[in-house]
């Protein structure tokens, strides 16, 4: 058996492993064969020194799945009891972290929300003021024209505020994505998963 046949049979035997783990073992045995070849052994001798690929694969799989069973056994009843007893501490810390993240999002979106609300309220107020300026003619034309001018000015500010809201929303969406990425990276960096 040559090196390629050995590695192929080993890879076939490790089919139940994840791709990254399988590649690590294949690379490891490839390097072992290369070491034997550098020491002067032929390819057939190097492969025979390692043993049968099926036995190697079964040993690797047994160890991998035994390790998984051992990891599952780590969640003992004592650990569960400690988690329940410690809930007031870790629960309050978790709630604090969630509220801090929520407050960061509120702060991020405060400015676009404010400009958006000014746009909506300004639009409503200017429409009402334009309609009311027709009734203000009773008090005098100059009052009606002044009210009409102010309502058009507020309408212009509302439209500018609406455009600013759209522009700010695009920037704040990007800021929210960056912030979310940093939060996820923080949890992934410590080995925690969301």
Image (cartoon, helix red, strand yellow):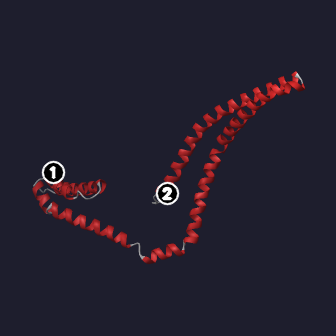
Mark 1: which secondary structure? helix
Mark 2: which secondary structure? helix
Q: Is residue 130 above or below residue 24?
A: above
Q: Residue at x 50, y 72 (%)?
A: 83
Q: Residue at x 62, y 51 (%)?
A: 104
Q: Nearer the viewer, mark 1 or mark 2?
A: 2
Judging by the rendered image, the residue that carries numbered circle 2 is 187
Can you give x and y, in whole percent of width and height, for residue 74 in the image?
A: 39, 72
Residue 154 seen: yes
Can you give x and y, in whole percent of width and height, for residue 102 in the image?
A: 60, 53
Q: Is residue 161 left or right of residue 180?
A: right
Q: Is residue 69 above or below residue 132?
A: below
Q: Is residue 178 left or right of residue 37?
A: right
Q: Is residue 44 left or right of residue 99?
A: left
Between residue 31 and residue 108, name the one nearer to us. 108
Residue 42 seen: no
Judging by the rendered image, the residue that carries numbered circle 1 is 4
Alpha-carbon neighbours of circle 2 within 10 Å: few (<14), some, or many (≥20)? few
Can you give x and y, in whole percent of width and height, for residue 87 in the image?
A: 55, 71
Give the quadrant of residue 1: bottom left
Give the quadrant of residue 35: bottom left
Between residue 76 and residue 59, name the one nearer to us. 76
Whichever of callouts 1 and 2 sits on the residue coming sooner in the sequence is 1
Between residue 119 and residue 20, name the one nearer to us. 119
Q: Is residue 194 above or below residue 77?
A: above
Q: CA distance from mark 1 to mark 2?
A: 41 Å
Give the quadrant of residue 137: top right
């Amino acid at each position: 058996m040559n090196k390629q046949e050995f590695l192929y049979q080993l890879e076939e035997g490790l089919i139940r492993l994840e791709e990254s783990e399988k590649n690590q073992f294949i690379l490891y045995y490839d390097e072992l064969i290369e070491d034997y070849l550098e020491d002067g052994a032929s390819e057939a001798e190097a492969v025979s020194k390692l043993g049968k690929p099926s036995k190697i694969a079964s040993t690797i799989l047994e160890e991998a799945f035994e390790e998984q069973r051992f990891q599952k056994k780590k969640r003992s009843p004592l650990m569960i009891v400690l988690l329940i007893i410690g809930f007031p501490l870790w629960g309050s810390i978790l709630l604090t972290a969630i509220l801090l993240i929520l407050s960061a999002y509120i702060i991020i979106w405060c400015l676009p929300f404010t400009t958006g609300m000014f746009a909506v309220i300004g639009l409503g107020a200017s429409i009402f003021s334009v309609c009311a300026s027709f009734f203000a003619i009773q008090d005098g034309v100059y009052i009606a024209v002044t009210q009409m001018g102010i309502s058009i000015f507020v309408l212009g500010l509302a439209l500018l505020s609406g455009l600013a809201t759209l522009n700010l929303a695009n920037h704040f969406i990007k800021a929210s994505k960056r912030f979310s990425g940093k939060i996820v990276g923080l949890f992934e960096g410590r080995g925690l998963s969301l």
